[in-house]
Amino acid sequence: MESFHINFLAFLHLLLLSLSLFSGHFLINCSALGQCVEAESTSLLQLKQGFSYFLFNTWIPGTNCCNWEGVTCDEWSRVISLDLSNQGLDGSILPCLLRDGIDLQVLNLRGNLLHGTIPDEFSPKCELQILNFRDNQLEGLLPRSLSNCQSLELMDLGNNNLKDTFPYWLGNMSSMRVLVLRYNKFYGLVGPLDENYETNYTFSTLHILDISSNNFSGNLCAECFSNFRSMMTNRADTQNDVTFIILHPISYMVLLTIMNKGQQMIIQKIWTIVKSIDFSNNFFEGEIPPTIGQLTSLQVLNMSHNYLTGEIPPQLGNLLQLETFDLSVNKLSGMIPQELVSLHFLDYLNLSYNKLIGKIPVGGQFSTFPNTSFEGNEGLCWFPCNTIFTTENKTIASTSTQASKNKSYMIVLGILFGVGFGGSMALVVVLDVMCCDRSKWRRSRRPIDG
């Protein structure tokens, strides 16, 4: 039954890829059927003027903007997608792109040299589904007018210089599936806006949450994790994901970068199926909430490089779909829960550099993990627990140090032995000479005395 489920998912992925390619081809062909709206063409040309460097040479006034590079139109010749990613654009984002005039569904400016702030000019009629400003030099606050974009499904602002508190006010968006804020300067707590928890701000549809490499601090919000409904196993949810991809093909054609198995991984087209949480490289403290164990469809969980304390909750053994699990470089204590052995899909584990003790669980995937997954925990040991677990490097260093000490000891002993032996021989020679001389003196005096 399990193999049938895996084969079905593989078939489903192939089917979705075919549908996306067909849909993309259909949209591109439709773009040439009619002339784009003049107001949209004017706004795009104004946007072009804001960049000091612009590579596309098809953006010519008086021509059909639906045929311009990076522009996609629908069957009514309305501009719905603008993809200017990785074009070396140097400049700022002009408000004309966000105001009324262009009803964009996709805005992708990833991988450029854009600087300044994100204009707080998102239209009340905002129809954005995809917003990708990753890998730029943007700074300042997140524009609060983003809350107008109630159809927003993916927002990737990673690798910028944005400085703000966690945007909990985005949690009421019923379609928000991906939120990436990694490598910025966000700070403060990640949790409810105030003590009176607003049930509308739950991020209930999130699939991917990446807030790594910021300055977030405080305890992890236990109730927040219990509200991530889309990260809990449900066959109906899977069917909804498939339906979503088929009905929203333009949202399906996007690149997303996440950390997986300790490395960056680029997801193309199937990001709606991935479930991932990355809170690494922050200043979180306190215990890991057991409520994370409810997210049974989670595939990636990374909370490394923080200041988390307490024990690893045994409830994490319920994350049966987990493939990547990283809690390294924290202050976790206690034993590794035996329940983690049931994570049969786990192929990357890192619990290194904590304060864990006791024996490492036996069975399941644990027999496949290298020593580096557990190094830096002086109290850990392999079964049977007769020797303290140490890393290969420490063992080699210890052996090398001991050998060095033994070598030094032998050299000193040799010197002392040599000095002692030489001194002894010298003493014998001296005594022999003295004895010989005294005998000769006595023999020379006897005839005279006689």
Image: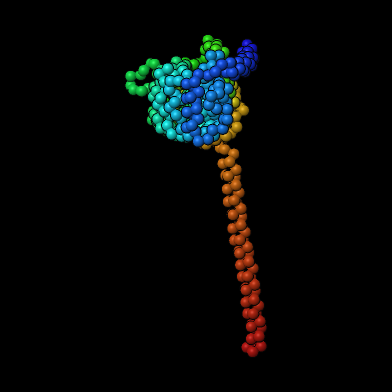
In the rendered image, the quadrant that contains the C terminus is: bottom right
Q: Residue at x 53, y 35 (%)?
A: 53
In the rendered image, the quadrant that contains the N terminus is: top right
Q: Residue at x 60, y 29 (%)?
A: 369
Q: Residue furthest front?
A: 62
Image quadrant in which you'd find residue 174: top left
Residue 271 appears in the rendering: no
Residue 438 placement (x, y as % from top left): 63, 79
Q: Residue at x 63, y 70 (%)?
A: 426
Residue 363 placement (x, y as % from top left): 59, 23
Q: Residue at x 44, y 26 (%)?
A: 96
Residue 157 placement (x, y as % from top left): 48, 28
How many marks overall? Answer: 0
Residue 31 placement (x, y as % from top left): 57, 18
Q: Image check: 212 left or right of 368?
A: left
Residue 77 appears in the rendering: yes
Q: How is the image coloured?
A: rainbow
Residue closest to the eye, 281 or 394: 281
Residue closest to the eye, 18 or 231: 18
Q: Image check: 62 left or right of 438?
A: left
Residue closest to the eye, 432 or 109: 109
Image quadrant in which you'd find residue 64: top right
